[in-house]
Image (tube, rainbow, N blue to C red):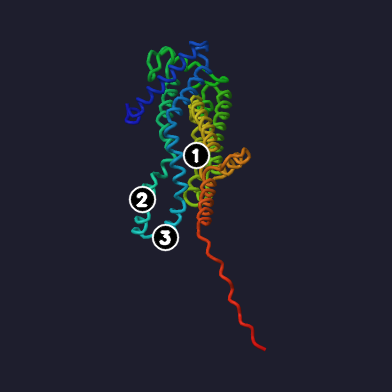
Amino acid sequence: MGFFELILFPFKWVVSWVIGMFHSLLTMIGMPESSGWNWTLSIILLVILIRTLLIPVFVKQIKAQRAMQELQPEIKKLQDKYKGKKDQLSRQAMAMEQQALFKEHGTSPFSACLPMLVQMPFFFALYQVLIGVARSEAGSTENIGALTPDQVHSFAASTVFGAGMSETFMGAINATGGTNFNVLFVSVVMILLMTGSMFYMQKMLMSKNMSQAAMTGPFAQSQKMMLYILPLVFAIGGINFPIGVLIYWTATNFWAVGQQFYIIRRNPTPGSQAERELNERREAKGLPPVGKAAKEAQEAEERAKVEETKPKGQRQQPARKNRRKR
């Protein structure tokens, strides 16, 4: 067992145990044991379980993103301060001041990627499970993770729209028995859904939930890179993903889109388009504004009170000029 496999072994065991448990429960309530839809739903339930457990991490991600947006004016000032200074000492000083800003506000550029990083071991573990299922022989008595030999055989024999759960796009093209068009069709549809939902999620974040200050600078540039690069990477990698992994990642993205939509609608970033739309809905219902608008209204009210409490002095009469004698 290699070092990478040794690290993934506990994740592989957990993933296979959870999928096997959900498969057994669905079989008990009447779904066919070898049905691809049984295994598909088991994978989707795995996603729901993982994403539910990751809600605290998602909350931390939201806070980190908002802190990074608030930091953009300070980072812009820092960049202007060291503009044109390319010597090593200046670069080190700029990096140290930038790290101090991140530490002071309790955030970092990597915090926004935390949920994805946490999910990657489970993603690779599921990939290993499905590859193991694909390579298992018909009469094999070997477990794969926590899956029993019977479950392994059931998983290997299951199909969705004629595509096996462990088959891949490239595997269907290079198959010795001829191209399996069912696998190609299902793979392409799942890749489009996976990358399309990823693009939509990032686009919604940028257009709705970023303040005006965050729309310029390095943070905006990194978000634009994620908008195009991540879907492209997953689209290229998707041709080698088993159908089961594509189902897992597509379901994960759909969950993330729904979760983000809920957060943006109910608790948007201060100063963002989503906050303005929320206050418009609240105004139509006769409710007070929230967020940045509420803060500005409160500050205006406090200034008005201060002006009212200032003592009003007696009005000074203009000096009367003496008329010139005729």
Above or below 27: residue 288: below
Mark 3 or 2, nearer chain start: 3
Say which quadrant the N terminus sits in. top left
Mark 3 or 1, nearer chain start: 3
Residue drawn where x is 59% and y is 73% of the image: 318
Question: 276 or 139: nearer the eye?
Answer: 276
Looking at the image, the residue that sits furthest to the front is 325
The answer to whether 79 appears left or right of 7 in the picture is right
Q: Determine the CA span between mark 3 and mark 1.
A: 32 Å
Which residue position holds label 1?
230
Question: 65 or 288: nearer the eye?
Answer: 288
Three-letter amino acid code at disc 3? Lys
Three-letter amino acid code at disc 2? Ala
Helix or strand or loop: what does disc 2 sit on?
A: helix
Which residue position holds label 3?
81
Helix or strand or loop: what does disc 1 sit on?
A: helix
Q: Determine the CA span between mark 1 and mark 2.
A: 29 Å
Residue 46 pos. (x, y %) = 46, 23
Residue 316 pos. (x, y %) = 56, 70
Question: 325 or 34: nearer the eye?
Answer: 325
Q: Which mark is residue 100?
A: 2
- Nearer the viewer's eye, disc 1 or disc 2? 2
